[in-house]
Image (spheres, rainbow, N blue to C red):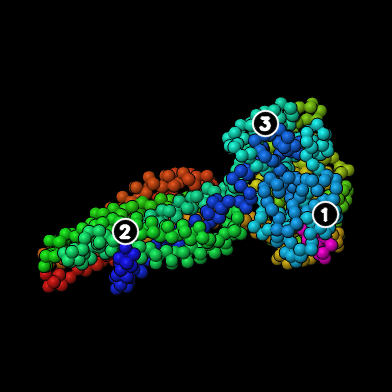
Amino acid sequence: MWQVLWQDLRYSARVLRRNPGFTLAAVLILAIAIGVNTAIFSVVHTVLLNALPYKEPQQLVVLGEASSYADFGGTTPGNFLDYQSQLHSFEGVAAISARSCTLTGLGIPVKLDGLVVSFNFFDVLGAKPLLGRTINPQIDRPHGPRAAVLSYSNWKQNFSGNPEIIGKPVSLDGESFTVVGVMPSSFFTPRPAEIWLSPHYEAPEPRSDSPPEVMQDRGDFNFLRPYARLRHGVSLPQAQAELRAFSERLAQAYPADQGKSAKAVPMLEWYVGKARLTLLTLQAAAGLILLIACTNIANLLLARGSIRQREMAVRSALGAGRNRLLHQTLAESILLAVLGGVVGILLGVLGVYVVIKLQPGDLPRLNELKVDGEVLVFSVVVSLLTALVAGVFPAWRGSRPDLTETLKQGGRSTTSGGGHLRKALVVFELTLSFAVLVALSLLVRSFSNLLSEDPGFAPDNVLAAELALPSAKYDTDQKARAFFGDLLQQARALPGVSQVGLVSSLPLGRNGLTGILSVGSPDSGESQQLTTEKRVVSAGYFSTLKIPLLQGRYFAETDDQRGVPVAIVNDRFARTTWAGQSPLGKKIKWGGGPWMTIVGVVGNVSQRSLEKGLTLDSYAPYQQVEGVQSVALVIRSDKDPSQLGNALRREVLKIDPEQAVSSLFLLRDNVSKAYAMPRFQVFVIATLGLVALVLAVVGIYGVMTYIVSRRRHEFGIRLALGAEPNQFFRSVLGEILVMACLGILAGAATSLALVQMISSLLYEVKSTDLGSYGISCVVVLGAALLAGYVPARRAMNSDPLSTLRDE
């Protein structure tokens, strides 16, 4: 058996070597399709299919609370303790809260992205350290020495990979932490961190032990994100049912929890978020490319089979059985698939490199992206399946030659055997190409709408610097305000600086505070509660970002703790709350804070994202708000703002030698990140659309060239009898137009299914947008006519004398 297969493959290699044009075309078509699928499957495999690097990751879930202002928000400390003590569907419930901290004592202060984790956090994840140990509830007792676990990159960069750091103290925000462990390079948490810190508290068992007061907090201070591990034998629906009952009990016990609903989401699903839909859509589009390639290869093999009919008839007459002919033809398909697969894998590796270079926005696990063994197996399987799908029918037709007709001397057919089938395959190619082009048109329209969206502020020529003050050192609001005041003063004095401002969270950032705001009268005691974006700003913030003033005034330097509490709202807030009235002089308050008088209305700003719509925004001066520790400094410069970075860092160190700048970047780059994922979607779909169109053009050209060559005898005789050459030109183009129109009609129906997959990715464009369908029609018709022009000209220029001479 293996000897026969080897003989078939050797013979196929000789046949393919004698036909380099056919071989090159088939290999390139396969390579492009397999390369596209390899690259996209590498991303899908890494992001969606690879297990998270934890023990039994399928048992891990993320807990959250849906409410009027969050679809899946965090929870409060008090609720977290109830999660731990009252829920029985989980082996353990842990929690994290973000904390950036400044590492000092090693020279220049270094800002680290950290997480404060509950004592059982690493146990719930089932994560093991590379060195030392993780945080342990039996060792790291509450109010004792605090423990820190380093990430692998932090250990390498800041501690030179020194294993002796285990057990040594480090200074973080002026507090002493003992380094107890280092995690391996493969470990990560869904919220990126360079260091994990033990908390001050421990969840009491039972609840009656009266935990510290801070852990009893309820309300909208939902800064904890719980993680949990399902008990063995407990399904996710069972856990969801318990969470619903748990939410009802909390709502009855605590008014602040009314309207909240706890739910659990598998950790991987929560982590990948919207990337899942994007990647599945791209994989579906890549699958269509593979079908188009299969159709093209099948057409090439059918045409080649017609040319080789005499060869197959001779071999059959000499005693070759049908199975023998079938195996021989399939061997050629397999050899083509192997060649195409090898080149395709190389193209796939190149495609993965391109994806990494594109840095597509919120795509998670990008650092893990590679072409691994499982992806290679996928590519090999796809290559072999392509060979079978594309080669079985042509091989079956080629194994049944008509001996009498084929071997007749001088026998000639004026028809193109199998022509209807080849045309049907071209129509199928056009159908799939049209569907991909419609998806591309819709995404391009959506991206264009997104680019034209006004974010509400001017990011050009603005440098942004994020800082977080350590609460241990800046333990009073007066100290923090003094630092911020000095920082504003020093930044204004930098050369080329025109305006400076502070804000608690930048637009299009992830750290904005969403919460309940009261609107009403402090005298009557009646108020309306709204969900709003809260921003703490300095007097110069709005002018620095050129956020327009619509009514009233901006904040002034005199709006401090000695003045009357004031606030500014955006235009959407004003129109929604006081339609037809002036909001100036109205009263609002944040949570349990003081009532603030509205003194101005500013333009709308895209706070969360460009595509999620405008929010109700409220602003307060930083001098009048308690507990402000983290801010972003924005500096507008008349020159290149990137040149101010080093000077700003020096000024920060002058104010506080132990204070580091968390991050420093151009605000324009931050805005560009908001377009990263839509830009990635358009780039990949555009690439797939171009590939689909090229393959369809190749298919049309190949089929029409074959048909014209088979009808050369007919054209020559008709010309000799007086037919006009233009008739043949119109005839060939007419056939192409019929195929294109059929492909467009079938593609319009097919595209409805594909478009439904991407409807949630569209922005300000309907999935039935007629313009997108019209553009796709024009492109497909134009490409089809372009592909058929050369065969049509060849038909028109047929030589009747040459044809009759052959006869």
Task: Decide if residue 361 is on the left or right side of residue 212.
Answer: left
Give yes or no for contact between labels 1 and 3 (Cβ–Cβ under 8 Å).
no
**Is residue 375 rendered to the left or right of residue 559?**
left
- Magenta segment boundaries in residue numbering: 102-111
Q: Position of residue 588 (x, y in %)?
A: 76, 36
- Distance, label 1 to label 3, CA atoms, is 37 Å
Counting residues from the start of the chain, the first of labels 1 and 3 encountered is 1
Q: Is residue 488 magenta?
A: no
Q: Nearer the viewer, mark 1 or mark 3?
A: 1
Tell which of 547 and 173 is nearer to you: 173
Residue type, label 2: Gly
| Residue 247 numbered tag | 3
- Residue 39: which numbered mark, if any? none
On the image, the x and y values in percent for residue 28 come to: 39, 66
Q: Quadrant of residue 485?
A: bottom right
In this view of the protein, which residue sits in the foreground, 37 or 625?
A: 37
* Residue at position x 44%, y 47% in the image: 754
The residue carrying mark 2 is: 391
The answer to whether residue 413 is visible is: yes
Give residue 690's quadrant in the image. Answer: bottom left
**Residue 657 versus residue 624 in the image, above or below:** below
Residue 301, position as x, y percentages in the image? 29, 62
> What is the three-letter code of the residue carrying label 1?
Phe
Q: Residue 177 has which mark?
A: 1
